[in-house]
Image (spheres, helix red, strand yellow):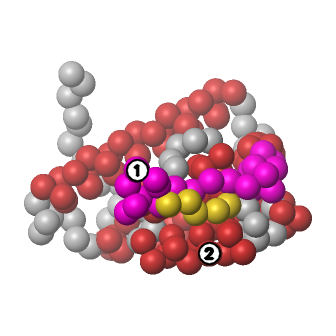
Amino acid sequence: MKKSLPPRSFYRSENYRPEDSVGYLMRQIINMVGQEVERQLAHTDLTNAQWVPLYKLYRGETSTVAELARQCNLDAGAMTRMLDRLEAKGLCRRVRSESDRRVVNIELTPAGKQAAEQIPGILCGVQNAHLTGFTDDDFHNLREYLRRILNNAKSISNLANDNPTHGTDTDAAH
């Protein structure tokens, strides 16, 4: 098992600048990538928030309202409103399970499948455009660094879940 190094102090309160923080930079990138994805999906009438559940359904990652809400990090009410909008656009339909009436499955319509089929190409184009000037090594290193940050975040989250008084200041990361 790989031994963890103690956390380094890359940031110090006496000279902290939010615009130089990794969290701020990642949030800015995510926002800008999301805006470009939404712009490129405009012809499908899908918003940035709507293509994610649609694509998860298309990939077969989930089939129920409850699973989709969990995977999209939405509460049941927000997922219901999202599905109302997707249904109104004719992209999916909710079907009550015949074996368990409490379970509601979601199915893509032919129009939903057609819209979802376009998503991977758009995502690839947008992400590749944002990586302009990167070498293969740059790309692989960046992805590995982001995975390390994600693994650290998961460890911190697990610690916080084990000890609810630990790590409650969520604004500190930005």
Considering depth in this image, is 125 or 48 the residue closer to the camera? 48
Q: In the rendered image of this protein, does residue 80 appear above or below residue 64? A: below
Where is the C terminus found, in terms of image quarters? bottom left
Q: Is residue 10 shown left or right of residue 27? A: left
Q: Nearer the viewer, mark 2 or mark 1?
A: 1
Q: What residue is disc 2 on?
A: 84
Q: In the rendered image of this protein, does residue 116 appear above or below residue 94? A: above
- Furthest toward the front, the residue is 98
Q: Is residue 100 shown left or right of residue 107? A: left
Q: Could you tell me which residue is drawn at 26 percent across and 47 percent down?
A: 155
Q: Position of residue 41 (x, y in %)?
A: 81, 61
* Whether residue 21 can be seen here: no
* Whether residue 145 can be seen here: yes
Q: Is residue 85 shown left or right of residue 158? A: right
Q: Could you tell me which residue is drawn at 64 percent across and 34 percent down?
A: 139
Element assignment for label 2: helix
Which residues are the magenta region?
Answer: 97-119
Q: Callout 1, which amino acid?
A: Ser
Q: Position of residue 172 (x, y in %)?
A: 33, 70
Q: Position of residue 119 (x, y in %)?
A: 75, 49
Element assignment for label 1: loop
Q: Could you tell me which residue is drawn at 20 percent across and 42 percent down?
A: 6
Q: Which mark is residue 172?
A: none
Q: What residue is disc 1 on?
A: 99
Q: Position of residue 44 (x, y in %)?
A: 84, 63
Considering depth in this image, is 75 or 137 the residue closer to the camera? 75
Q: Is residue 174 magenta?
A: no
Sequence-wise first label, 2 or 1 = 2
